[in-house]
Image (cartoon, grey):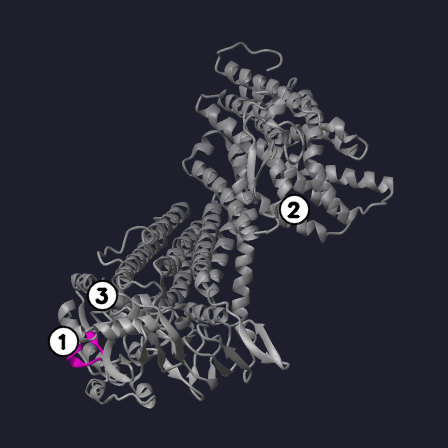
Amino acid sequence: MHVHHLALAAGADLPLLFAAGFVGSAHCIAMCGPYVGACAAKFAPPGTAVGSMVGQHVLLSAGRLVVYAIFGMIAGSFGKIALALTQSWHLDGLVALAVGVAMSVLALSMIGVFGDPTRVLLPLGLGHALGAARATVARTPRMIAPVLLGMTQGLLPCAMVYAATSRATLAGSGGAGAAMMLAFGLGTVPTLLALGLIPTRWVRRPASPRLAGVLLLVVAFFSMLRGAAAFGWVPSGPLW
Amino acid sequence: MSESGRGKCDHCGLALPRNPVSEQSGAATLSFCCSGCLLVYRLIGGTGEGARADWFLARLGLATLLSGNVMIFQSLSYFGSLDQVGASAAETASWIMMGCALATFLLLGVPMLRTAWRSLGEGHMTLEALIGVGALAAIGYSTYQTFRHGRALYYDSGTMLLVFVTLGHYLEAEARRRALALLEPALHAWQRTARVKRDGGEQLVPPDQVRPGEYVRVLATEEIPVDGTVTGGISDVSEPQLTGEWRPRTVTEGADVMAGSVSIDGAITVRASAAGLTLRQKVEVLAASARQERANIEVAAERAVRLFVPAVMVVAAGTFAFFALHGAPARGLQCALAVLVVACPCALGIATPLATTIALSRAVGNGVLIRSGRVIEALAGVHAVAFDKTGTLTASQPHVVFGPHDEAARLAAREPLLAAAAIEEGLLHPYAIALRTAARALAGPISEAEQVRVTPGSGVEGRVDGRDVMAGKLEWLRARGVDVRAADRIAETGRPAVHVAIQGRWSAALPISDPLRPEAKAVIAELHRMGLSCHMLSGDESAVVADAAHALEFDSASGDLSPEDKPRHVERLRVAYGPVAMVGDGINDAAALARSDAGIAFGTAADLARRHADVTVLVNDLGAVPRTLALARRTRSVIRQNLAWAFIYNIVGIGLAAVGLLRPVIAALAMVLSSLCVVANSVRLRGGSEATTASG
């Protein structure tokens, strides 16, 4: 079925999302590092054994991936309905086009062309919620605290995460969306696990979010091609 | 522009994009590459904004977003779009709605039920209980349906109910917070210190830390920080804001003084009486009692809700029973649910408090403190307005005023006035200010005075152009050996005057009085336009009162009234015209203010704490009276419209739902629309103007 083709054609997108996550995560360290540091002092005081430290960072990433997967599941579920609706209205490619446009805006903002569009979320009280969450983390047992903290971190507004989530809208179902976001999230894990080991000056290279932005722009382009193909404006290709 | 020229993110250090996210922090503008960096920067204590975990607002925002999603899917499903595209999409939508609705219930419903549970423990059932239970029923039943793959979903009714009621609570709290914030400057002005005699010395402490029985010293020109009794010294004290009496009062040992009055010309020692609450605490206590005092219309609405709830339960149960007996229990459940949803007393519950709260905060914005919703109702219903004259229609700023028939006296007083003004130069006594103003108006030469000596509470003496000049009370002049026989005739009239003696001989009495406020005439005209009759009640001489009443076009006037006479006159006005508002100032009108249907007092926040006036006007503008009455009328009509709307909607809605003509979805939509109507109608009070030409 046409809708299935649309939904399952992850094509080159999965590796691209993984790569974007990997390259872009350098920015995560610069951004979230101080936050993680401020909170980690509560459950991993200085002098904690290296093994335990790594374990805690694994839990931290696990928490973040859970949130990404939930994002993916929500996006995939919403997307499923949107895809079905547009199909019933004979506007098959509409969702793919919309996702392409949204991803392009987010990706271009990472490259530095636009200001961060996620700033619209700032007045929604997100800061208050995160502050409250941080206070909760401080009172949580040592094993759960890193997971909760990772989940909080996953909730921070981030153009890269939203771009990937937009793509998950096309996944076709909640489960597929979650899987797609996990692929993206796994890309960010290696860098964040190596948090303590990477010299800061490596991290602060401005190229990192830009390169991730370029990769996401490619995914956005594929998505738009997919939409255009569904409308019959361009022929279908192997990657879209 | 080069990249380095744009600078780096103040949090992560990466290059900034062309259009960075910026935030003002003190004098510096911080720039961030993305909003994530800004949030983290705030969170780790950069600016502290995020640390104030205003969880309430965050919950409301999140719940609004979630219920918005529920609403979208519910309307898609209602219009049949989801069914067209297949069962799978509809099924997914059902799960999404369940997730959003359960999250909304956790965010808003659970705290509401907790509040309801607490008040149930105290023995009363609140609207929160109904709303919490209603939302729980709608969401719970829908969740059951989702698990059963059923299609009777009412997630939106439940979530919208929670969001609307919480939004109402938020608006109410916000309006109160703003009202208190507006009071802040008035309260702040009162944060004085007291010189307390302790441990053999003097200590400066905040007035609320003065213990009863302690001695407080007050120097000339200082404000008296505590209530108490004078134990030493003599001074004139000025207390127009407290008593409405514009004439300074001389206090000596044994006299009672009140916090907030000013010792004008002498130092006194005051023994503090009962340790009072701080003014701030008094205002807060008052505000709390105001919240408990509810308008009659509000009480009536509440009582109606109390009868209404069990009635709705009975109708819902009856509806279910009817359909069940006729072999359609599922349809019966649907109709019963529709009855419950459509009857949700949401609009009824917010109809009065929302309008009242908006009106109260609007009034505070005009510089008027209205004690409660009940007062708004009373103000809206008055037919007549009675005014005190002194300090209300007049400005409590003494002037030297000669009567229309005193032309000769005025000419004779020219020389003494200039001499008296010379020795009064630089003094803060209200009479001194009045003399100087009058002297300046004469444009005569005011000489330099020498050897000026002030006798607190009595008068001033000094040498002007080589002559001894004394100005003050007649008894003081007499006691100092001045021949005052020529003055006795004037003194008999009892009207206040500064007596002047030159070279040991009485030479003139300078009559002091309090002229009418410039805006008074326009205000009375405005009240007449509003269909109100205006009456003057004054302790002043009848002739003076009649003149003033004629000038201002009052409907009636009574002079020579003692404080005990005024309440009787208010009573008489009520019999003749209907409900009466009394406009007065200070505690000398307290009895009349209390006897009237709505007492409007001019004064300060101090009065509010002291006297429990219905309405306290903090601005020095009589125009506040017609403005406040107009606002009260508008509020009353908005409340009536709200209640009428809510009741009609409920009765029609329940009727339709009970006979099965209203699907629960439509019921929920109607409920939301009804609440929106009430909110929109109430918010009208924020805008518009209390049309009056008589503003100062």
Residue B408 circle label: 1
Horizontal side of B625 relative to B57 (left or right) equals left
Q: Residues within 10 Å of mark 1 (few under 14, many from 20)?
A: few
The quarter holding residue B359 reads: bottom left
Highlighted magenta segment, given as a residue range: B536-546
C-alpha separation, residue under disc 2 versus residue under disc 1: 77 Å
Say which label, 1 or 3, has the lower sequence index.
Answer: 1
Question: In the depicted view, which residue is nearer to us: B277 or A57?
Answer: B277
Residue farthest toward the front in the current orientation of the protein? B466
Which residue type carries mark 3?
Answer: Leu
The answer for which chain carries disc 2 is B
Tell us which disc is closer to us: 2 or 3. 3
C-alpha separation, residue under disc 1 versus residue under disc 3: 15 Å
Q: Is residue A169 something one can see in this rendering?
A: yes
Residue B442 circle label: 3
Horizontal side of A87 relative to A6 (left or right) equals left
Horizontal side of B278 relative to B615 (left or right) equals right
Say which label, 2 or 3, has the lower sequence index.
Answer: 2
C-alpha separation, residue under disc 2 versus residue under disc 3: 65 Å
* Secondary-structure class at tag 3: helix
Say which label, 2 or 1, has the lower sequence index.
Answer: 2
Q: Residues within 10 Å of mark 2 (few under 14, many from 20)?
A: few
Horizontal side of B15 relative to A84 (left or right) equals right
